[in-house]
Image: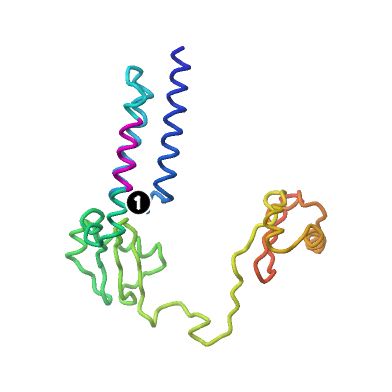
Amino acid sequence: MIFVTLAYRTLVMFIVMLVTMRILGKRQLGQLELNELVVLIMLSEIAVSPITTQNHRLLYGIIPVAVLLVGELTIAYLCLKSVRVRGWIVGKPSTIVKNGQINQEEMRKNRLNLTELTEKLRAQGHTDLSTIKYVILEVNGALSVLPFESHKPATYEAHSLPTKDKGLPVMLINDGRILDQNLQGLGLDHRWLQKELQNRGLKDPSDVFLFTVDENRNIYFAAKNGA
């Protein structure tokens, strides 16, 4: 009986946490702001308690989760409506580098050392600080690097070259399965798809690992290993 109770409690708390995280929205762990990180840590502790402590009612876990959810949604709303409130709760971005010069005071304030700074810059493909106009430490801990105009990568627009937007590639075959809804959404049919496969030496869609097409009918094709 105790195992059934344990399974039941686990299932209920799993559903509660799933719904809670779904309401809170989509965030990658590295993009969490301070208030969101605090809520996540507290939620993880609260969710386990009613599962492992049999003499606690499930409401002892559900009510705190609901309170945290309402609190987080309230904070998110206030931050959305007021820049000042957002600054108090979440904090403000810090300018670590300005016009190629390191702001040592901001580095000390944010406990960021030179080794960490150079590592993060190298990870983004920057090795020379003199080519960087701004480095901004965002509130979620990420570094935004803005190089000087003369050191930005060349673009078609800068050289007045004609461009044509390919649009978003749409997946038509996923690991051998034809996605009929996507196919119809592009105004295509199985006959067109079969012809394109035959042009690439395949007859059966089950031999295709990935097949995508964009708005300009540019195709990306990958056969399964051994096909």
- Image quadrant in which you'd find residue 111: bottom left
**Which is more toward the observer, 177 or 118?**
177
Residue 90 position, x and y percent, is 26, 55
Residue 60 position, x and y percent, is 31, 26
Span highlighted in magenta in the image = 62-73
**Which is more toward the observer, 12 or 136?**
12
Q: Amino acid at mark 1?
A: Leu
| Left or right of 154 on screen, residue 32 | left
At horizontal 40% and vertical 79% (from top left) the residue drawn is 151
**Residue 125 is a magenta residue:** no
Quick check: 1 above or below 20? above
Quick check: 33 above or below 47? below
Q: Crowdedness of circle 1 by 10 Å Cα count: few (<14), some, many (20+)?
A: some
**Which is more toward the observer, 43 or 114?**
43
At horizontal 24% and vertical 61% (from top left) the residue drawn is 92
Residue 148 position, x and y percent, is 35, 79
Residue placed under numbered mark 1 in the picture:
32
Q: What is the residue that sits farthest to the bottom in this orientation?
A: 160
Q: Main secondary structure of the magenta part?
A: helix
